[in-house]
Amino acid sequence: MASEFYNSEKLVLGLYTAGDEFQIAAEYSGESYVGYYHLDNGFIYTDPSPIIERQPLYPYVLEDKREERKYNIIKDTETGNHPAPRFHLPKPTSADISQGWMLRYFVQRVPDRTITEIDNTQYESYGSDDGIDGNLHKKISIRWKITGTTLAIEFTNSGKLRTAEYIMPGISDYLNNLLEFSEFSPTWANQY
């Protein structure tokens, strides 16, 4: 029997969830996963370490939110007086550069899967009466690596995007430059 080689840089072992984070089925099952899990090359699996019987985990979504989304997909209209998402081009701060990463915020319109990068203010007001419509959009934040070696930045950001794809399909196409805002980006020297 051939043993499978696992690169320790691509694994995060022995993580635990108390529930309401993941589910085993890609479609709504009604049950959230409780127990140990691990990350393997940007994907999330059951069990504290890689074994043959492991199963992929998906973000847990409450059934009532899925029903609201289905309704709005069929209706395909904005509800209430919610503002449309406004595009925001982020700029790393000196604190972001010091810590090596920055938070980026996105919403996706459910009916047509249009993705828009937004600022923290819009992200925080999402779903409120004066925020982006939470019934018509999904939101996600990504901790985007901006310092290190090109390999480390690309590896980290690629893994983040693979995980984010479960919540927001198409985000990898939207963020196709894994070195964006890093010191290896052509705009780094001109802007930071």
Image (spheres, rainbow, N blue to C red):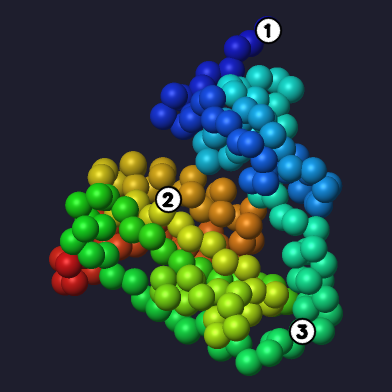
Secondary element type, mark 2: helix
Image position of 88 with respect to 4: above or below: below
Disc on the earlier residue, 2 or 1: 1
Q: Residue at x 19, y 72 (%)?
A: 191
CA distance for labels 3 and 1:
53 Å
Q: Measured from the top left, where is residue 39 in percent x and y?
A: 55, 34
Residue closer to the observer: 161 or 14: 14
CA distance for labels 2 and 1:
34 Å
Secondary element type, mark 3: loop
Q: Is residue 168 left or right of residue 87?
A: right
Please tell me the numbered disc located at residue 110: none
Q: Measured from the top left, where is residue 178 in percent x and y?
A: 40, 56
Disc on the earlier residue, 3 or 1: 1
Q: Measured from the top left, where is residue 12 in percent x and y?
A: 49, 30
Q: Is residue 136 left or right of residue 99?
A: right
Q: Residue at x 28, y 70 (%)?
A: 91
Question: In which quadrant is the N terminus drawn?
Answer: top right
Give the image quarter of residue 136.
Answer: bottom right
Residue furthest out toward the front: 129
Residue furthest out toward the bottom: 81
Q: Residue at x 80, y 63 (%)?
A: 64
Mark 3, residue position? 76
Q: Which amino acid type corresponds to the residue marked 3 in the rendered image?
A: Asp
Secondary element type, mark 1: loop
CA distance for labels 3 and 2:
32 Å
Residue furthest out toward the top: 1
Image position of 107 with respect to 151: above or below: below
Q: Is residue 136 left or right of residue 163?
A: right
Q: Are marks 2 and 1 in contact (CB under 8 Å)?
A: no
Image position of 191 with respect to 7: above or below: below
Q: Which amino acid type corresponds to the residue marked 1 in the rendered image?
A: Met
Mark 1, residue position? 1
